Amino acid sequence: MLKSSTLLPLIGCILSSAVSATEESRPNILFILVDDLGYADLGCQGSKEIRTPHIDGLAASGLRFTDAYVTAPQCGPSRAGIMTGVHQARFGYADNEKNHGLPDPKILPLMPEYLKQAGYRTGLVGKWHIGQGTEAMLSKKARDEYRKIRKVTAFSQERVEAAKPWKRGFDEGLFFVGGGGHYFPFRAKRTDGSSANYFTFNGSDRNPKPFERDTVAFKTDFLTDAAIDFIKSKDKKPWFLYLSYTAPHTPLQAKQKDIAANTHIKDPARRIYAGMMTCLDGNIGRILKQLDQQGLRKNTLVVFLSDNGGPTSKNTSRNDPFSGVKGDVYEGGIRVPMIASWPGTLAKGKVISEPVISLDLLPTFTAVAGRQAKHPHLEGKNLLPWLTGKAECPGGELFWSWRENFNAVRIGTLKEIRNGKPVKAVDGTAIPAHNFVDLVTNPRELAGEQTLKDEDKKQRLSTALDAWLSSVKVDADKLTPISKSPPLR
């Protein structure tokens, strides 16, 4: 347990030099986050239906992780954990609806703030959906509707400011506030005349402006265009780009040519989902081609990740062979596809089976930038020495907490699940809400004879999880200060 006095008050204290490198030689970092992708819905993950040659090629050029996790089975809290490097439960981010937003940057910096301090040009393209603050950018009519749906009455002024991406280390951005939205046709102005979905900011212009064009291309194509514009900049600084796609999140919408490319799939809804993946894969191919054309591929770390497991009943995604879906702390809700490629630095075509978690990205990215992130609440590990073959896997215990009663722990291959509700395996087998498993012998986390029987091992899991949940509660009281300013109404 950490005392409040250990909190670092200034961002200037959070980075220390780790390696010496000229500004021009430091690698770029492209972080691609997709939305609601099923664990089994990439060719490189074993899919025989979904064709993803460009993503498969990315995996073949680098590392593919079989046991990669996110911190929550839902997009908002998962993204908050990624951006802070701290499990979001430590600052009261329970789920999309019940959250305290993001802490002040003096309390807890975000990933782009670390990298900006390290001398990087930083960009955001796509879905933000973190915290309460950006909802305050909506018109009064849209905000009232949001409050009605989310059952909130007002926003804390501090949390409004803390959740604005242009105030949290991003130099440039084209982003949208909400979690989903239609793919085409996109209209900058809603039919009710309320404010735009998309906002842009750039350089010295720190006040975001609504995106002015009335209609744009299919959303996935549009976001890729913006990402390529960022990459093509003549700025000599190394860059960090957070490219946050919504695909394949609902609504199920795809271009006709992409649906037609998947006629081998009989289920019409699954065929549209596959069409969305065809488009996503093609756009990732476009970005990789741009890096090649600019001679940047060998000097760019590309990381591909999904924000949570697939919601199988919503978008027809598949999390095979795992049980559970988005909204569960069973493997199907939290284990996700992950790829890291950096030609010439990381091994080519290697499959990594050791467990990693999205909290590891922030300390790894800062290490790539030649710095060491320091903060008393950082929970992730710098994976760079291990991934480059200079050290052993850092290992450690992994924890999850979502809402109030969805909690889990993994130690080695052993896992305790407190899911809050029962789930079903892929074959329909019923699984209780509370379970103990060894993922080596029971990856589907089945109950009955498949469960973990060793009482000492079960006690070790429960003791670790209970202790971690207690520390989370203590930290949440420190990192979630009560607002002292009038609420934004």
Image (spheres, rainbow, N blue to C red):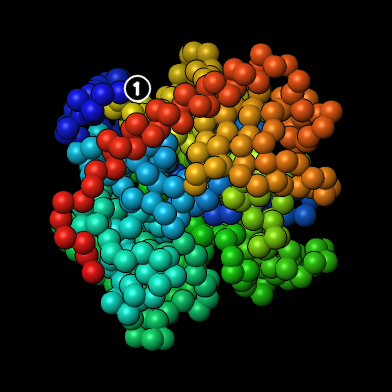
**Are there few (<14), some (14-19), or many (20+) residues within 10 Å of tag 1?**
few
Would you identify the image quadrant in which residue 475 lies?
A: top left
Left or right: 349 with respect to 360? right
Quadrant showing the C terminus: bottom left
Q: Give whichever of 347, 446 is nearer the camera.
A: 446
Q: Residue at x 58, y 54 (%)?
A: 36
**Residue pictured at 66% horizontal, 62% vertical:** 315
The answer to whether residue 445 is above or below residue 212 is above
Q: Position of residue 299 (x, y in %)?
A: 41, 35
Q: Residue type at mark 1: give it.
A: Met
Q: Residue at x 61, y 51 (%)?
A: 326
Residue occupying the far bottom of the picture: 192
Q: Left or right? Give the position of 305 relative to 96.
A: right
- Quadrant housing residue 481: top left
Of residues 221 and 378, the one drawn nearer to the viewer in this rendering:
378
Disc 1 target residue: 1
Q: Please indicate, yes or no, whether residue 56 appears anywhere in the rendered image.
A: no
Above or below 194: residue 172:
above
- Measured from the top left, where is residue 473 in percent x and y? 38, 34
Relative placement, left or right, of 360 versus 260 is left
